[in-house]
Image (spheres, rainbow, N blue to C red):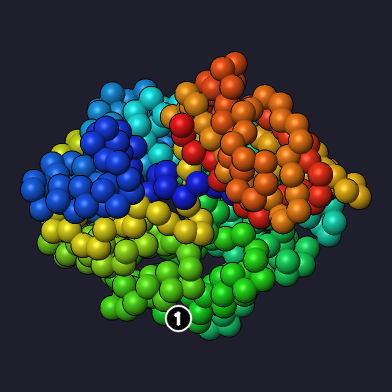
Amino acid sequence: MTHVSARDSGRRATPLRLRAALVPIATGLVTVATTVALAASASAGTTLGAAAAQTGRYFGTAVAVNRLSDSAYVGILNREFTSVTAENEMKWDATEPSPNQFTYASGDRLVSHAEANGMRVRGHTLAWHQQQPRWTAVLSGTALRNAMLNHVTQVATHYRGRIDAWNVVNEAFADGGSGGRRDSNLQRTGDDWIEAAFRAARAADPGAKLCYNDYNTDGQNPKSNGVYAMVQDFKARGVPIDCVGFQSHFTARSPVPSDYQANLQRFVDLGVEVQITELDVEGSGSAQADSYARAVRACLAVSRCTGITVSGIRDTDSWRSSATPLLFDGNGTKKPAYTATLDALNAGGTTVPPTTPPAGDGDCAASVSVNSWSGGFVATVTVTAGPAGLNGWVVNLTLPSGATVTNVWSAQNTGTSGDVSFRNVSYNSSVGAGAGTEFGFQGTGNGPTGTATCARA
Ligand code: 9MR
């Protein structure tokens, strides 16, 4: 049994709202890119989300789900932001309070809110040494490794098709000069725990971008060098990693590093996307505003720095509220840091490429299971819809030479050898957001082993 999965590479490169507006007038990805560039020079965005969208980026915030009943909070959230990250609600302690007993109510509430408002979701976080449920404390070795992998699989499967990017592993590197891994119960299960988590996440949700996320990695230093070496190694060995998140918690003692942009760029040069994931800046007034602007400019100068997330909305929402680190004060009034951020976004920068290979994801994902015998095979293909759902889909794959399709069910094929495409039939054209449908085919020769792509049709 081989398992092949792949994603179309166009989807959330451009934020949903902007994409919806562009689709009717754009005939191809190149046209989309041109249109975005023109939009950037034609008018300034009046919200953070709209301003970031001009260069194909999202602007997100961490959300505490219990604040979704605060209308002032939700008003700012819906007006300004195009992506959300659960502040605590998708962590291991929140989602699996007892072994193999999962509670998704709070996380689901956030994902539904995001979908209803055209926002993307960054999942946070599948495997972390902190905020683990109490029951993991007595586990070690294989038992802990298996518990972690089950957690990753269950949670990523639950949210399959609804997550733009997962922070699969959070904060696994040590502070200080070693450049090595942090000691933790997960680390003590073996150095390969991180790649095992990434492989499990990919199998569970092939449409989500998979990221490593950490703090104090914003500039080039021993810790970020350690993460860099890991990403380089993962890329060389085919471990699925698509992105690196830079938390970017800045204080007077730990300001925006002068080589921030260069550091983001060196990771991009390894073939991953980067994102700023928990941006906040201790302080006030113009000093704080300048730091925000510098951080935004660094991301916008890196074409595959695809989005920025701040650590909350109002200073009073921050888990370190005494540092007044956010863009809105406790009354929801825009601070100088807000204006500096908006201005920096409107000043433009590189445009995010509309396709983000190799880690992009599509309106849908196709994963193929192949059962082979000598001389023939049966392939079962699962089509999973993205957050917008589907009303028609097409899956393309390539058969190895000598293979021929002899029989197809629940889809209509064009071609029987080489490049073959499979379209929905009438009863399975409509697939709800995050839901899946299956079709299959039988053939002579060897079954497909390469990537299968799925697209809206
Ligand atoms: O914002 C989170 C706060 O509400 C929690 O009390 C805290 C507990 O560890 O975690 C905060 O978020 C962390 C994030 O998940 C990862 N990066 C560092 C943040 C502070 O630890």
Q: Position of residue 447 (x, y in %)?
A: 76, 48
Total number of numbered discs in the rendering: 1
Residue in the picture at 76% in, 53% down = 402
Which residue position holds label 1?
A: 221
Q: Position of residue 335 (x, y in %)?
A: 15, 48
Residue in the foreground of this view, choosing between 77 and 122 = 122
Q: Secondary structure at mark 1?
A: loop
Task: Indicate yes or no: mark 1 CB to ligand 1 under 8 Å.
Answer: no
Q: Position of residue 314 (x, y in %)?
A: 27, 42
Would you say 45 lies left or right of 442 here? left
Residue in the picture at 33% in, 49% down = 29
Which amino acid, by three-letter code, is at mark 1? Asn
266 relative to 76, above or below: below
Q: Residues within 10 Å of mark 1 (few under 14, many from 20)?
A: some
User: Does any portion of residue 127 appear in the rendered image?
Assistant: no
Res 380 → quadrant? top right
